[in-house]
Amino acid sequence: MLFCSIAFNLLDSPFFRGFIRKWMPGIKVVPTRHAMEGPVLERLLAIIVVSIKEASSAGAFVSLSFDGWKSIADRKLIGMLESLVDISSGALTLDFRGTTDIPSLAETTELVVGQVEKELSTARPANDYLTPLPSGHFDDACASVLTSIVSDSASCSVGAKKQFSQKHRSIIMVACTAHQFNLLTANMITHPALKPSADKCSRLVSLFKQSTKYWRQLQMCMDETLGWRKSLERRGETRWFSHHAVVQRLLELKPALESFSNRFNADRALQATANGAAVIDLLRSQSFWEETELMARLLKPIVIEIGLIEKRTSNLADVCAAFGRLYAYYKQLRAETAVAPPVGGAVSPLFLVAADPAVTALTHHICGSVLGFLQWRLSKYFDASLLVLVHFLDPKRHVSGLRTTAGSPAEYANLMRLFLSLAARFGLPRAGDIPAEKESAEAVKSVQAFSAYLGGGNKDLLAFDFPPGGGPRIAAVGMWQMATTFRGTILPAVARRLLSVPAHAAEMERVWSGMGLANTPICNRINKDRLTTMTKVVVHMRADAAAARRPRMTYAPGSLVGETLAAAVASGGGGERRGYGFPPSTRMTATSWRWTRSMKRRASTRRQESCRRRWMRSIRPWGRKTWRPLSSATVGRPRWT
């Protein structure tokens, strides 16, 4: 009820209370409005505070993220969120610290710095977490330590992180990778070669969104040509990656849209509307559909990478791999659409992508621009050497995908230098801190451990790659903690500290999205403290529900049939009668699985339709149906006799 756009006043309605008692017989007391916004929320908040305190007292690497938000009542808020990664197991816990009202203040660097300092001063007396010492070591007074600050690339956030990096050298400042990929999509959409196509798609969607008449006609075309209905997607104001959903949905509905254009080509009412004639011309234009397919092809890799990087357990090791995959894809696509002059002197494409050579040239031109933007964002907002080192310290990745030749960032000698400089930044004993003999021994042990890991030592850690359970966790942190091969050196401490750094600030955006569900036009007078408390409760309720949810079963091409299904078929337990029809030794491909699932759905639909018809025949009134016109003498009587 917290995030379903229902006011708390409904709890005082006798009809609603009777509904709850009828359909929830186990409930003893139905809370009132004042109880829900008072004791109930306070009790839930107290439980959350205790669980967060347990996670921080056990020892965790803390990452702080912040962002601004404007409510529906034009109230400006700035919020703080911390993610705690358990030092031993890598279990991930989120804690929404709270919000601050900034109604008439501009978002400047000084404002952001002041809010972060306020949060640090609040966490210090409560002993939630502490900043590292100037030497880079952890403070023994608290088990949890702040290791990173993650935010978007707004100017105020970048300036604030720059000031904190000068004050705390051992805290890692990270730019939100999901935000960077979203802006990369904006660079592609606003490209002079693609911007007209994006505007055409928006104009097409706007016509059907604004006119209910033609939207119903399009739905009828969907029923006739496709057999199902889907709604059109609209692009978000700042969610540039939503353009992919727009063009992808248009391509899915292409048969229905073409049928609509053929049917209403000569419709005078449609031609008289603002964009009616232009939309009909677009739907009947082959070049428009080619441009739409090109846009979907170019946007799809970025949308996939955004979905991967926004996972709750993604860390800095995923950033290097994401940039590498995007760079390799667009570089290969650019090479495939290159042109070369043959003997005759004319220019012809090496590999034809479409029938129109203009699409091939357009693809080549846009891929070159995307590669430039991708390189610029990596160089400006990220430390490439740090990303390479974190990628290498992930036991599942190691040197996979990295170029280790001479002169490359992942060269073995370069990796060794990066590790030693980062270890000194995190507090590796320096000259004067310990005796010279012990200092030399520590340095030798660290170099030997890193050299052993370079030579394939990640295989010893992969033995501790246990399946996740009981909630999200970063598996690499747990592997470095449980492995005994490199124990006694500084290598596990550096690796766990780096691998605990998140790659995005998307959790803060999810908090704002949830808060927007509660702060609706119906509930627009909720004060800031109550709204923050409700958001804290719902964030943890969603995390608990996600941890308790069973993992979804997926079927990959070439995978064997499940053991239960195979045993049922082999023993004659009804597998054939249920419509599976697979012998135990048969491999089920993705295509056959989708076909079987489709046939089941069709059979279920036919059964439902048959039941509905039998039910309609059973409730038909007695006698023959005759229509009696409605007149003054028959007012108030049934029209069917």
Image (tube, helix red, strand yellow):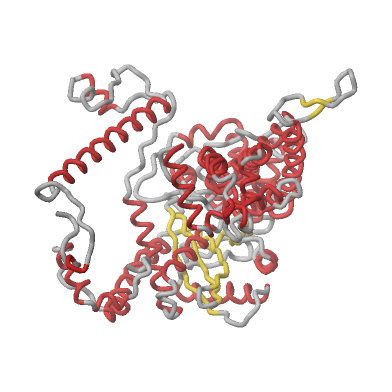
Q: Name the image quarter holding the C terminus.
A: bottom left
328 up-or-down from 107: above or below: above
User: In the depicted view, which residue is nearer to us: 332 or 633?
Assistant: 633
Q: Is residue 620 above or below residue 25?
A: above
Q: 52 above or below 87?
A: below
Q: Quadrant of the N terminus?
A: bottom left
Q: Quadrant of residue 545?
A: bottom left
* Number of residue marks: 0
Image coords of residue 499 (percent x, y): 54, 49
**Residue 2, picture quadrant:** bottom left
Q: Where residue 567 appears, x then y in whole percent?
A: 23, 23
Q: Is residue 456 visible?
A: yes
Determine whether 593 is above or below 479 in the image.
above
Q: Where does residue 389 sit, x and y in percent of width and height?
A: 64, 44
Residue plotted at (46% across, 40% down): 483
| Left or right: 19, with 346 as reference point | left
Q: Position of residue 196 (x, y in %)?
A: 71, 49
Direction from residue 333 to residue 13 in the image, left or right: left
Point 63% across, 73% down: residue: 113
Pick the front one: 595 or 544: 595
Q: Nearer the viewer, residue 569 or 353?
A: 353
Image check: 396 left or right of 320?
left
